[in-house]
Image (cartoon, rainbow, N blue to C red):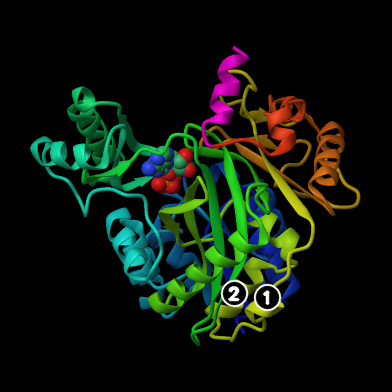
Amino acid sequence: MFDKILIANRGEIALRVHRACREMGIRTVAVHSEADANAMHVRLADESVCIGPPPANKSYLNIPAIITAAEVTGAQAIHPGYGFLSENARFAEIVEAHGLAFIGPTAAHIRMMGDKITAKQAVMDAGIPVVPGSEGGVDTYEDAVPIAEKIGYPVLIKAASGGGGRGMKVAETAANLKEAMDTASTEALAAFGDGTVYIEKYLGRPRHIEIQILADTHGNVVHLGERDCSLQRRHQKILEEAPSPALNDDDRKKIGDVVRRAIEAIGYRGVGTIEFLWENGEFYFIEMNTRLQVEHPVTEMITGIDLVREQIRVADGQKLDIKQSDVTFEGWAIECRINAENARTFAPSPGLVTDFHAPGGLGVRLDSALYAGYSIPPYYDSLIGKLIVHGRTREEALLRLRRSLEEMVVGGVETTIPIFLDLLEEADFVSGNYHIRWLEDWLASRE
Ligand code: ADP
C-alpha cells in the first residue's frame, strides 16, 4: 500500500481524502495556493507545498507544480478530488508517466466519458438506455432541422464538452433552434475550447437519478444504489438524497444490474457515477462522471462503505472485498450543500468567519473545512460545507436535518442555510414529490 498520497485539491474534499488516508495509515501531502496557506486541509496534512498564486489556473490547475510537489515530497499517488484536474485525462497520463499512481480511472476512460457524445455511444453499446437524440455531433443548422423534427420539440442543444450546466440551451420550436445552437456552441467554445454540440429530446419534468459504481482492476464491479439529485438551480445540485423517494427495490435492482454489467463491459476502474434522467418510470442516460462526486456521502451513509478508501485500494491494485450481494442499504440520507452566498440573490459572500459551531449528534455528519477565524477566499467556489444526515426512515432524516440546520452557526458571512430551513416547510419536498425544475419554480415563487 502507498505510504504517502498527495491531495491535489482544497476545501472540504481535500479534508475528506485526508481523513480516509489517516484511517488507512497513509501520510498526506496537501498542496495549496497562496490564498490557502491557512486552510484546514493544509493544517491537518502531514506536509504541505505551496503551488502558486491564488487563481486556480496558476495553482490547483498547475500540473507541473503539482507533479513537482509529489516528487519532492516522495508521494506515490495523487488523489484529484472533484473539480480542478479530476477529469483531466492529460493530467492522469502525466501523473502515470512520472511513475505515480492516479487515484481514478484510466486516461482513456476519462477521455471517453469526458466527451458526452462518445460517452453516450459507449454506454449505449453496453446496454444502457439513453435520451433520444442525434447520433453524434451536429455541425450545421441545416443538419439539425430534420433531427429536431424527428425527435420532436422542445429539444435541448448540448455541448459535447459541457459541464457544470454550461453549454446547454433549449429550443422550444424551429424558430429558436439556430439561436440555441449558436449560443450553446459559443459558450462551450469559450469555456471548454470545443464548440461541438449535439441534440437531445428535452424532458419536461424528470428526476435526476444517478447510480454509484465501484470497480477494481480485476473485473469486479458493484453498484451502490442511487442518489436523487433533482433539486437543482441552474442545472447545479443543491440537495441530494439516497435512496430516491421515487424508486422501489425492483427499479433499483433493475437499473443497478444494467449499469453494473455495462461498467464491467467497458472495463472501467475506480468509482464512477452514471447519471440518468428518470421520467414515467424510464431511465435515460445523460452522462458519466469519472470521479468522486460532491454528493458521495449520502451513498456512504446508507451503505457504510468509505468510497475514498475503496478508491485508494483499487488504485493500489487490490481486489474489492465486497460482492454485490454484500451491499445493503440502511435507512435514509440527505445532504445539503451549504454555500457562502446570499440566500436570496445567491451572490457570493466570502470573508472572515467570525463564529462557527458545527451541528452534531446521532446521524449527523458535517464535511467542512471551516473554522472560526478562517477567511473564505473569493477565488474559488462558494461551497463551505456539506451537512449530511442519516435516519432510519426519510421522516427521521428530515427531522434530523431541521434540528442540525438550526444548530449550525456560521457568523460573519451569509450562507444558504435559510433556504434549506424553508424547504423543510414545503409539502412537495417533505413528501419527496419533486423533479428537476421544482426548485427553480419554488425559488421564483418566493421572489
Ligand atoms: P453537466 O455536465 O453540465 O452537469 P448534464 O448532462 O449532467 O450536464 O446535465 C445537467 C442537468 O441538466 C441535468 O441534471 C438536468 O437537470 C438537465 N438536463 C440535461 N439533459 C437534459 C435533457 N435531455 N432534458 C432535460 N433536462 C436535461
Residue 361 in the image, given as x and y percentages of width and height: 91, 49
Q: Which residue has dot 1 on it? A: 26
- 290 horizontally vs 438: left or right: left
Q: Which residue has dot 2 on it? A: 312
Residue located farthest toward the top when viewing the structure as drawn: 447
Which residue is more in the foreground, 90 or 332? 332
Q: Identify the residue at horizontal 68%, vertical 53% (top origin).
A: 242
Pointers 1 and 2 in contact (C-beta within 8 Å): yes
Which residue is more in the foreground, 326 or 308? 326
Dot 2 alpha-carbon crowd within 10 angstroms: few under 14, some 14 to 19, many 20 or more: many
Q: Secondary structure at mark 2?
A: helix
Q: Is residue 354 above or below residue 157?
A: above
Residue flagged by tag 2: what amino acid is it? Ile
Location of the C terminus by quadrant is: top right
Q: Identify the residue at horizontal 23%, vertical 37% (top origin).
A: 185
The residue range painted magenta reads: 436-447
Residue 425 colored magenta?
A: no
What is the distance, in whole Å, between disc 1 and disc 2 at their CAs? 10 Å
Q: Is mark 2 within 8 Å of ligand 1?
A: no
Dot 1 alpha-carbon crowd within 10 angstroms: few under 14, some 14 to 19, many 20 or more: some
Residue 267 in the image, given as x and y percentages of width and height: 41, 78
Residue 439 in the image, given as x and y percentages of width and height: 58, 29
The quarter of the picture where residue 434 lies is top right
Residue flagged by tag 1: what amino acid is it? Ile
Our reading of the magenta stretch's main secondary structure is helix
- 380 horizontally vs 85: left or right: right
Which residue is more in the foreground, 233 or 88? 233
Q: Is residue 317 visible?
A: yes
Instruction: Name the front one of labels 1 and 2.
Output: 2
First of labels 1, 2 by sequence position: 1
